[in-house]
Amino acid sequence: MRKTVFGEVEIVWFGHASFMLACDTGLVYIDPYLLPQSPEKADIVVMTHEHADHCAAENASRISRNSTITLTTPACAVRCSGDVRTIRAGDVVEEGGIKVEAVEAYNRNKPFHPRGLGFGAVVEMQKVRIYHAGDTDLIPEMKGLNVHVALLPIGGHYTMDEREAAEAALTIKPRVVIPMHYNHIPGTEADPELFRRLVENRAGDIEVRIL
Ligand SMILES: [Zn+2]
């Protein structure tokens, strides 16, 4: 478990695509396939698509209390319990001062994630906008996202690799970019230091944080 801070928001990475975003007013998990032994309870759980390394229904139950809201796709929602709401790209949910915007996420040259299967999520809390890309390639919708922090997959095979993700970072222009979705499941071996060089050599105002 590695963590960093942007503004008032703590960003905790458990590995792969699993993150916790925490501030004084709320706690959001995204794709909680990996969790610590005694995780805190969530206000909102976001699961970006139905694949087992993202739609982790049992883990979602572990981090849920009665008031927890789960936001996910229909195919993942059928495996979940509690207050589960299905969302798709374009939808916005606001709850307890936290805003979640679902945005497009899909493959352009791979079969795994056709458009509409899943989504990426922009979570806004304490005026900080954090983009979790989900499983995606570089797509035109990334332009104009207007986010402070971008969590981008770099593992290749199912998603962008280091080079494509660096292009995505240059397209999105966040203040901070954090690589994810690498070196955990087979086929996603990648070098975050290569990603760092590819971004920072071309855009000195984007900071790469390797968690
Ligand atoms: Zn996937």
Image (tube, rainbow, N blue to C red):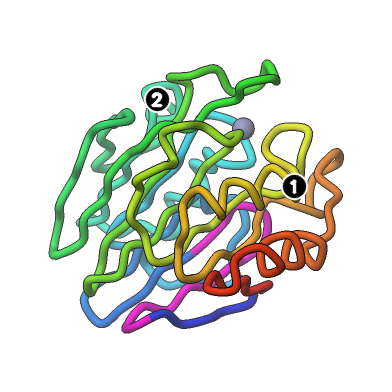
Q: Disc 2 residue type?
A: Val
- The image shows residue 209, relative to residue 31, as above or below, that is below
- The image shows residue 192, relative to residue 61, as above or below, that is below
Residue at 30% in and 70% down: 128
**Residue at the spot of label 2:** 78
Which image quadrant for residue 209? bottom right
Quarter, ligand 1? top right
Which image quadrant for residue 127? bottom left
Image location of residue 192, percent across then percent down: 77, 63
Assess disc 1: are there few (<14), some (14-19) or many (≥20) residues with their C-alpha within 10 Å of its C-alpha: some
Task: Check residue 9 for magenta coloring.
Answer: yes
Which range of residues does the magenta coloring cover? 7-19
Mark 1: secondary structure: helix
Q: Nearer the viewer, residue 166 or 66?
A: 166
**Magenta stretch: dominant SS?**
strand
Identify the disc placed on residue 57. Answer: none
**Residue at the spot of label 1:** 163
